[in-house]
Amino acid sequence: MNNTILKNGLVIHSDGQKREDILIENDKISAVGDVQDVVTDIKVIDCTNRLIFPGIIDAHTHMGIPIKGGNSVDDFESGSKSALNGGVTTIIDFTVLGKNQTLWESILERHKHAEKSVIGYDLHCNITRFDKNILKEIPKIINKGITSFKVFTTYKEAGMMLTYNEIEKVARVVSDNGGILMVHAEDNNVIEKASTPLIEQNLTDPKYHAIARPAEAEKIAVENIANIAEKTDCEFYIVHLNTARGLKIAKQSNKIFVETCPQYLLLDDSIYERENGQMFVASPPLRKPSDCEALWNGVIDGSVDVIATDHCPFMLKDKPKGIPFQNIPNGMGGVETLFPVMLAQFRERKIDLSRLVQLMSTNPAKIFNLYPQKGTISVGADANIVIVNPDDILDNWTDKLVSITDWNAYSEFPAVFPEKVFNRGKLIS
C-alpha cells in the first residue's frame, strides 16, 4: 500500500480555494476534507503555507515528430520527464499520418512511440489526407475511445491541408458520432499571397515569418470554421489561437473552444529582431502586443478555454542563424515551463488561481473526456497533484530544468516550480 496524507494545504479547485487535507491511497485520491481517521502506516506531509493544484494537463504536445527534414528533439521519454518536473502529469499528443497509412495504423504506431512516457498520455488523431476511407474510419476510432481529430487549413506544400469543403465533410461525421474537431486555423491562400513575394525578393530574415503569415490568415480561417460549425453542429477546438480578431470571431460561436499558448500571451513579434530571433519561429507566428493583451483579457473573462504549449522543441544547432524563415523548423519547447511560468504570471497579474486550474487542468480534462479521472482534486480521481511554495518565485531558474534541450523561450520570465509532484500517487520530488 502507498498511503499519504497531505495536511493543511490550500487546495486550488476550479471553482474556488479551500484549506483541506487530501488522502492518497495507492494511485487514487480517496478523501478530501478534514481527514482524521485514516489507515495506519501512512506518510504525512505538512503542506502549511503551500498551494495544492491538480496535475496539469498539456493538451497540445508534439513529441518526436518529423518536421522539415528533422524531428522535434523530445521523444515521449525525455519530454514526459521534463513535463513532470514542471507539474504536467498528463499530455495529449498527436498521431502522424503516413502516406499509405490508415488512421488506425497511425494511432497504433504513435502508441508504440508513447510507451516510454513516464506520465499519463492520450492522443488526438491527425487527419492530413482526405478520402472516403478516412471518413469511414472516424466512427470506428471514436468508438474505440479517441474522440478528438485535427485538421489543417494550411501547409498545402507539405501535403497536410484540407480544403474548407473537406473539413465540412469531416465535421459532419465527427459531429454525428460525438467527437470534436481541432483546427490549425490559418488560411493558406492568405499565407501564399503574403509569403511568395517575400521569398521572391529574398526577404527571408526571421521577422518576415510573421509578415508571411499575417493575422488576416487566422481571421479568415476562424470565420470559415465558425460557418462550418453552424452548418454541421460540430464542436470545434481552435489550437494555438493568437490574434484579437480571431478570438472575437471564435467566441461568437457556442460551438468553438479556444486554446492559446504561453508564447502568444508573453512574447510579441518584435522578438524576431533579436540576434536569436530564428529560435522563436513557430506557426502561427508571434503577434502584436495588442494581441497579447486581448488574449490575456480572454484568459480573465473566460473567452479562452485552454492554455497549452504546442510543445515542439529544437536545439540551437537545429535553427542556425541566417537560415531563411521558410526553412526554419517551426516550433518551440514549453511543456516543462507551462505551469511554473504561468503560475508566476497569474500571481503577478492577480488573476484568480482557480482560472489557472480551469485553463490547464479541468477544462482540457472535460473537453477531451479525461474528467473526472483527471483535472480535479476529488474522491476517485487519479492522485496527480502538484504542491508549490507560492513565495518561491525565481528569476534565474534554468538550472531547475531537466529538459534535454539547450534553449528555452521563457528564461527572462519569473517562474514558480513545483516543490512536490505526485504522479498517480507516487511522490516524484
Image: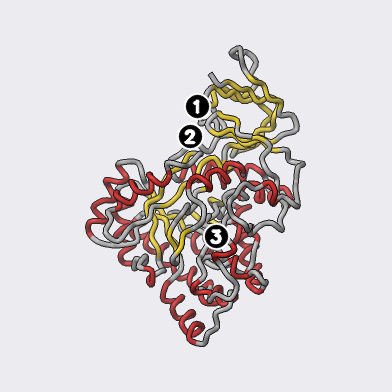
Disc 2 target residue: 372
Q: CA distance from mark 2 to mark 3?
A: 34 Å
Q: CA distance from mark 3 to mark 1?
A: 38 Å
Please report the residue visible at 56 percent of the width from the left and 55 percent of the height from the top.
303
The percent coordinates of residue 424 (x first, y second) are 52, 31
Helix, strand or loop for disc 2: loop
Helix, strand or loop for disc 3: loop
Disc 1 target residue: 380
Q: In which quarter of the view is residue 67 placed?
A: bottom left
Furthest-bottom residue in this view = 201
Q: Nearer the viewer, residue 397 or 216?
A: 397
Q: Nearer the viewer, residue 42 or 109?
A: 109
Disc 3 target residue: 314
Question: Dots 2 and 1: beta carbons under 8 Å?
Answer: yes
Please report the residue visible at 72 percent of the width from the left and 47 percent of the height from the top.
347
Q: Nearer the viewer, residue 12 or 212?
A: 212
**In this picture, residue 298 sits left or right of residue 394:** left
Q: Amino acid under label 2?
A: Pro
- 328 relative to 203, above or below: above
**In this picture, residue 282 sits left or right of residue 350:** left
Classify mark 3: residues with Cα within 10 Å, few (<14), some (14-19) or many (20+).
Answer: many
The percent coordinates of residue 412 (x first, y second) are 71, 58
Q: Amino acid under label 3?
A: Phe
Q: Amino acid under label 1?
A: Gly
